[in-house]
Image (cartoon, grey):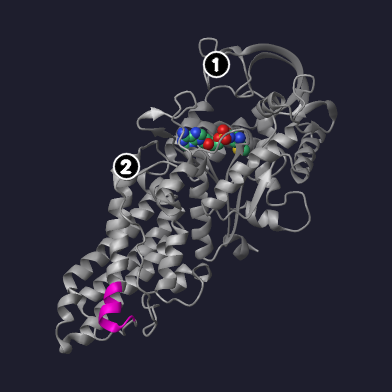
Amino acid sequence: MQEKSERTFYVTTPIYYVNDVPHIGHAYTTVAADILARYKRLEGYQVFFLTGTDEHGQKVEKAAQERGVDPKTHCDEMVKRFQSLWERLNISNNDFIRTTEDRHKKVVQKILQDLYDRGEIYQDEYQGWYCVPCERFWTEKDLTEGKCPDCLRSVSEISEKNYFFRMSKYKAWLIDHIEKNERFILPLSRRNEILGFLRAPLDDLCISRPKRRLSWGIEIPFDRDYVTYVWFDALINYVTGIGYGSEGNSFSGFWSGAVHLIGKDILTTHTVYWPTMLKGIGLDPPQTVFAHGWWTVEGKKMSKSLQNVVEPNRLINTYGVDAVRYFLMREVPFGIDGDFSHSAMIHRINGDLANDLGNLFSRTLSMVLRYFEGLIPSPSHLQEVDRGLQAISERVLSQVSEQMNDLALNKALASIWEVVSAANKYVDETAPWSLAKEEKDRPRLGTVLYHALESVRMIALLLAAFMPSTSEKMWSELGMEKNLWDQNLKVNGKWGGLRPGRKVPKPTPLFPRIDPTKISFE
Ligand code: MSP
């Protein structure tokens, strides 16, 4: 059992509000989760990758009312925007959860009932302030100049009976858990932020909304006059998605290695509400909650009112799926804020993708065509420079594995580019075009081209998780027989997997250069 659970990996994205138009921030987390999932699968892990949509609450109810449709119909239409974007972005999620599904309602109600039966939930009169856009209650002391501390919009005074989860009693336990588990909240700056937050008193959590105010939610099983607070409902998706409370043992196998990827704005819900809720029902906290930074656009906050929301679909139309995936992961260290600009995007595409990677690929394949009629040559006597290239790629293979474990996705890409640069340098230094002039140098020419191509094979393997279509193309053009996705990085990442004698085709450019004066956004 121990052995099995060590080989499982469970990664999640936040479930996105179904009302929103998917933007670059949503794509960012989802692509990052996809890369981790694909990478771990290539490392031989049994992986479960979950994403989905958050469909209850006041905003959805209101939007549906305004359109004159019932909320479920509204959600059914809206959810397609996320689902089709994930398909276009090549997202390999194992499941897509919607909080309006029956399987989820059942789990939420089961958890509520369990907590209620254990005395973890009680009813009380609530007096305070409510922020409709954030769907959150605040006490007087929380407010910033009388406004919601999160979004700085107006709040309304509220007094009503509600149900509360005894979150406060877990405060000491939570602090202890955070302190003892360095990987629970990442990056470390976020861990410190939450430890700071926990220095102030922690209130119990209001988990209900009276139906007369909000009906679009999951009914509280022990009091039909109420629905569940949308965050309490939403967080539970992470256990519903892997079968909590249902037959079979897929839940426990995956839960022990859970990694939640989130944006920095939803840190408190994921590292205070969620672990205490889990503790209440007798489950362990997730292994890691990683909060990434936020994207600005050309230096400005991204917002509907500024009309500068970056829509991934438009980026894909202009630059292609893999270039978008690459840019998002390479441009900004995972965990800190970053800025999107078209000039930065074009710079990355023309530099890293067209010049470095694209040229390496096309020039090595072209030389095999020119000098060996397209048949991959056999290597013979090795020289220092050949061993050097092999050593770099083997070092990078193990380095990337560690960086992926640390969720240092941009560093992993930088490491992979060390192989790309080393391979380009190798070709420059060994100068196959000179070796091709003398018949006596043919064995050496074969060795050099074999090595250059073998580094391309290694790059295709290492990049597969980041740029799936590009790697698939590289892989098949190298004449590799087996499916890329059936490879194991430990086994097939060993130098020398390329088979001499296979035929390579005339390469087509991986990434054409972009002329900034000629791009259009549609
Ligand atoms: N529904 C909740 C999450 C519930 S999870 C149990 C939610 N949804 S959301 O659609 O508003 O936001 C989803 C994610 O988008 C959050 O992780 C948020 O950080 C992220 N982003 C929103 N704007 C962003 C940027 N400008 N940049 C990067 N990520 C951003 O919150």
Q: The disc labelled 2 sits on which kind of residue?
A: Ala
- How far across and how far down the image is residue 139, in percent? 61, 15
Q: Quadrant of the C terminus?
A: top left
For the point 46% across and 54% down, which residue is it? 405
Q: The disc labelled 1 sits on which kind of residue?
A: Arg
Q: How many marks?
A: 2
Res. 360 in view: yes
Quarter-of-image position of residue 363: bottom left
- How far across and how far down the image is residue 272, in percent? 59, 33
Please determine whether, in this image, residue 167 is positioned above or below residue 394: above
Q: Nearer the viewer, residue 120 or 495?
A: 495
Is ligand 1 within 8 Å of the beta carbon of the residue shown at mark 2? no
Q: Quadrant of the N terminus?
A: bottom right
Tell which tag, 1 or 2, sits nearer the viewer.
2
Q: Which residues are magenta?
A: 366-374
In the rendered structure, the answer to whether residue 357 lies left or right of residue 205 reads left
Q: Which residue lies under the disc numbered 1?
A: 153
Could you classify mark 1 by the number of other residues whose Cα lies within 10 Å: few (under 14), some (14-19), or many (20 or more)? Answer: some
Could you classify mark 2 by the number of other residues whose Cα lies within 10 Å: few (under 14), some (14-19), or many (20 or more)? Answer: few
In the rendered structure, the answer to whether residue 32 lies left or right of residue 109 reads left
Q: Which residue lies under the disc numbered 2?
A: 344
Quarter-of-image position of residue 415: bottom left
Q: Main secondary structure of the magenta part?
A: helix
Quarter-of-image position of residue 135: top right
Label 2 secondary element: helix
Please determine whether, in this image, residue 436 is positioned above or below residue 420: below
For the point 28% across and 71% down, which residue is it? 364
- Image quadrant of ligand 1 equals top right
- How far across and how far down the image is residue 131, in percent? 61, 18
For the point 42% across and 48% down, which residue is it? 324
